[in-house]
Image (cartoon, rainbow, N blue to C red):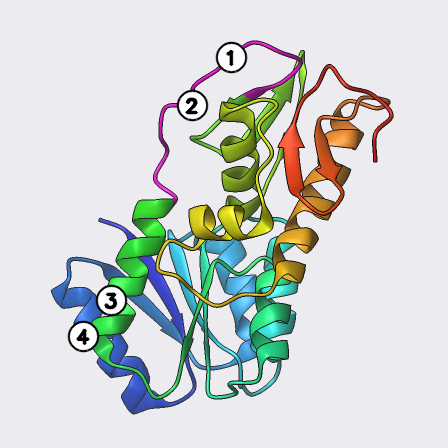
Amino acid sequence: MSRILIVEDELKLARLEADYLNNAGYATECLDDGLKVVPWFKQNPVDLILLDLMLPGKDGLEICREIRAFSTVPIIIVTARIEEVDRLLGLELGADDYICKPFSPREMVARVKAVLRRLKPQEVSGTEGPISLVPESFRVRAGHKETELTAVEFQLLQALYDQPGRIFSRSKLMDLIYQDQRIVSDRTIDSHIKKLRKKLSDLLPGQELVHSVYGAGYRYEPQVNGEQ
């Protein structure tokens, strides 16, 4: 049974979310104070966090940033602020999805199911080359070294890695990562790719694995060096 942490300071809404998730077969825990979230989570691992943005003590974006410094747990941001900058910032910080208030509890359950299903480990094709992917832990290995990716970073790398040399447009990558046709900016994909390339560069100094193709998108091709 997957465990969901609900971080919400509106008591009635938190209870409603918990009831619907419990009925869908998930175990839930609830917190209503932003200052308690990170310490609690470090002691109590969960499978997904439903994270409200407007919280007493510490806001959701700061909590998301702190959690992403040490964990790839899926995070769905819940917000009453519909400005695109908030959505973009949340996704760039490593959130896996967002829900705008007011929302249907059934929609919320569907989003939780979709994220957990999307992040479920799958067999990765293609094992030759300087790196190998470990979907069970969202890690990338190179020899005896390895690094951990966020869920979104891993999905991006897997899409590129499975078809080396193919150029993926930003819109194609967005379709692969956000299959419910979520509206996100090209900048969101660029931000995730930038972080992914930095981690791969730290893992394999001097080797360029993910290449940007001017005006077209990105491709995985470890044999080509020096291209920006």
Residue 143 x %, y %: 67, 11
Q: In the rendered image, is residue 36 in sight?
A: yes
How far is disc 2 from disc 3 in space, using C-alphas? 28 Å
- The alpha-carbon separation of the residues under discs 1 and 2 comes to 8 Å
Q: Which residue is mark 2?
A: 124
> What's the CA distance linking mark 2 and mark 4?
36 Å
Could you give the CA–CA distance between mark 4 and mark 3, rounded to whole angstroms? 10 Å
| Residue on which the image places disc 1 | 127
Characterize the local packing of mark 1: few (<14), some (14-19) or many (20 or more) Cα atoms within 10 angstroms: few
Callout 4 secondary element: helix
Predominant SS of the magenta segment: loop
Q: Nearer the viewer, residue 14 or 184?
A: 184
Query: Which residue is at the front of the view, 107 or 143?
Result: 107
Disc 4: which residue: 19
The amino acid pointed to by label 3 is: Val
Which callout, 4 or 1, points to the residue nearer the camera? 1
Residue at the left extreme?
Answer: 23
Contact flag, marks 2 and 4 (Cβ < 8 Å): no
User: In the image, which residues are magenta?
Assistant: 119-132
Q: Residues within 10 Å of mark 3 (few under 14, many from 20)?
A: some
Residue 203 x/y as whole percent = 74, 26
Q: Disc 1 residue type?
A: Thr
Q: Residue at x 80, y 21 (%)?
A: 207
SS for callout 2: loop
